[in-house]
Image (cartoon, rainbow, N blue to C red):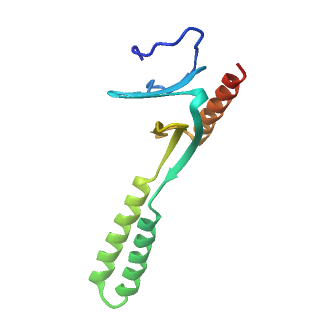
């Protein structure tokens, strides 16, 4: 990222492929178009990997399909309609699941980004790198 400047003695430890998130020896920087957030490592209060989903969609989809099967024993039209609605709800459930990494500061700043396309091991590795950087920074 051409706008990112390091401090004297600061080094980049890792960054995302698109340079949206950069971890240095002193801070974590998130930059995307006009949105820029930076948290100094000594102000990181916590970091987490969070899984977001809407399980009620899958539940309702399953109920609709079961209701369609039961209703289909007496009427053909209700079977297809209920199964279609149930399938759509289950598809929406799978399409809206996502993982994100959330970094909280001891103030009000929070950096949150989706781990889309990132393997779980890579996300865990990033969390470990942040924790190691904080430990090394605190040792100064």
Residue at 55%, 24% in the rendered image: 27
Answer with left or right where residue 71 lies relative to residue 133.
Answer: left
Q: Residue furthest bottom?
A: 74
Could you say which is closer to the camera, residue 125 or residue 25? 25
Q: Residue furthest front?
A: 107
Residue 122: percent from the left, percent from the top? 59, 35
Residue at 58%, 43% in the rendered image: 48
Residue 1: percent from the left, percent from the top? 42, 17
Residue at 40%, 70% in the rendered image: 61
Quadrant position of residue 11:
top right
Residue 97: percent from the left, percent from the top? 45, 53
Residue 140: percent from the left, percent from the top? 70, 19
Could you say which is closer to the camera, residue 47 or residue 108? 108
Answer with left or right where residue 53 lies relative to residue 41.
Answer: left
Number of numbered discs overlaid on the protein picture: 0
Q: Residue furthest right?
A: 139
Answer with left or right where residue 33 lies relative to residue 14.
Answer: left
Could you say which is closer to the camera, residue 43 or residue 103? 43
Quadrant position of residue 54:
bottom left
Q: Residue furthest top?
A: 8
Could you say which is closer to the camera, residue 19 or residue 107? 107
């Amino acid at each position: 990222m051409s706008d990112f400047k390091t401090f004297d003695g600061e080094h980049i430890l890792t960054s995302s492929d698109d340079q949206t998130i950069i971890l240095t020896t002193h801070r974590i920087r998130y930059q995307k178009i006009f949105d820029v957030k930076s948290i100094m490592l000594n102000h990181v209060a916590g970091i987490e990997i969070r899984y977001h989903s809407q399980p009620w969609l899958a539940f309702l989809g399953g109920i609709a399909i079961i209701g369609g099967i039961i209703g289909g024993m007496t009427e053909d039209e209700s079977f297809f309609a209920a199964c279609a609605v149930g399938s759509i709800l289950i598809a929406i459930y799978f399409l809206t699941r996502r993982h994100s990494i959330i970094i909280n500061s001891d103030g009000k700043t929070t950096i949150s980004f989706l781990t889309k396309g990132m393997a779980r091991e890579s996300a865990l590795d990033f969390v470990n790198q942040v924790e190691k950087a904080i430990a090394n920074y605190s040792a100064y």
